[in-house]
Image: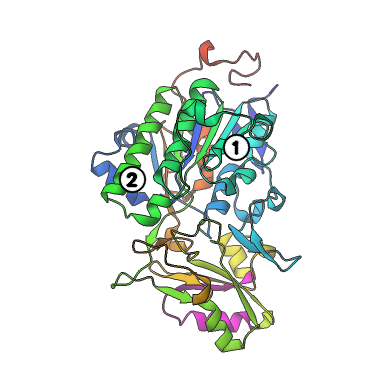
Amino acid sequence: MPTTARICVNARSYALPREPLVVVCVDGCEPDYIGQAVASGKMPWVAQVLATGTGLLAACVVPSFTNPNNLSIVTGVPPSVHGISGNYMLDPETGKEQMMNDPRWLRAPTLLAALADHGLKVAVVTAKDKLRTLLGAGLRGICFSAEKADRCTRAEHGIDDVLASVGRPLASVYSAELSEFVLASGVWLMQHERPAVLYLSTTDYVQHKYAPGTPEANAFLAMIDCHLARLEALGCMVVLTADHGMNPKVGMDGKPQVLYLQPWFDKRLGEGEARVILPITDPYVVHHGALGSFATVYLRNPDKAAELCAALHDVVGVEAARVRADAAQSFELPADRIGDLVVVSERFHVLGTSPGRHDLHGLDRPLRSHGGISEQLVPLLINRPTPGIDAARRWRNFDAFDLALNWALPRAPVCAATSSGSADHPLAA
């Protein structure tokens, strides 16, 4: 059982929670989604938080993709420390491309696992299963995905009969309902399991299809607002942030603006001299065609990297091109898990490998995507005041737990009714 009021994880010190804490990562939540929904009266709970709690803009990590940012949030550090540099990578040992969803790629412990080891009950619900094993690395607690909620077992996920418990059917991975299942599960867990810490991560299916202020986007944000209000009513401190923003990636004709990098390098260097890797790649490409705003390139002759970066800066649609060392330093990335150079496209462009490797037939609306510097801005909201913070500093989405545990004022002293019986800490499992 815990014997101290603080815990140190990845060189950051955190107070133990004094009331149930819920951290929600709304995938792809460009701040304008919230602004438009609040202005339309669709998010009354968030409107109240902005008036009486804490409302900040924060920067996510680049590449602005799901895996590196969710892991930054739960470790409290950038990818240069935790090691997850994208959704997809080139294994430097085998030379094979693969998903980066195995815990063996993680180089730092999560705060979630550390809190559970301290005796607190911790629960995690993620929309897509690709993220579950990373978020659950070393975690002794509940951890499952909405995508495979029908396959949960107590031995592997810490819980079973999820569909019956939550009272919702299994949702399609390409639907708003998948995110709603995550949030509804969070409410059910808080009602019946009463975790001290609950981490919820949604999917950006809606944001890939609908711009801020559209009826579909506002309806989605209204659903989120309703569930967050329910969590607050259950006595929770609630934090809302995002893994990345989202932007349109089309020209004035509404067609995708894609820079295909492999042909560019082949023409300049010759075939086989460069290999383009897109870290956005994952099993769920229907809504973005594996097109994002960040690419990493491996060269047969790394000495050409600086020359190529200079040439790329003259290409329309490129915002930044940096050699490995510069990219690792400026984007806080592990140098051994990126290529010899990194390319970032500007706001209205995405990067591809070659045309034949991207299937865009699934796009039924103008392309919206992410991955670059232009998608770094995200919300960071807490339903509690945080007196004493420097609101003008550059906050990061991975400051979420620090703000909640070290700065936010609890609503009231934890009463005996919320205690699990531990003499050491009122929220211990």
Q: Marks 2/1: CA distance?
A: 33 Å
Q: Looking at the picture, which amino acid does disc 2 mark?
A: Ile
**Quadrant location of the N terminus?**
top right
Picture quadrant of residue 254: bottom left
**Quadrant location of the C terminus?**
top right
Q: Nearer the viewer, mark 2 or mark 1?
A: 1
In what element is the residue under mark 1? helix
Classed neighbour count for the residue bearing mark 2: other residues with Cα under 10 Å, few (<14), some (14–19), many (≥20): many
In the image, residue 349 lies at what x, y percent? Answer: 41, 70
Up/down of 386 relative to 304, above or below: above
Which residue is at the front of the view, 29 or 412? 29
Q: Which mark is residue 391?
A: none
In the image, residue 385 lies at what x, y percent? Answer: 41, 32
In the image, residue 194 lies at what x, y percent? Answer: 54, 22
In what element is the residue under mark 2? helix
Q: Looking at the picture, which amino acid does disc 1 mark?
A: Arg
Write the start and end of the magenta stretch as one range.
304-324
Up/down of 353 relative to 330, above or below: below
Q: Is residue 388 visible?
A: no
User: Furthest residue to the right?
Assistant: 93
Which residue is at the front of the view, 300 or 356? 356
- Please tell me which residue is depicted at 34% across the width and 64% down the height of the picture: 366
What residue is pinned by disc 2? 34
Which residue is at the front of the view, 200 or 35? 200
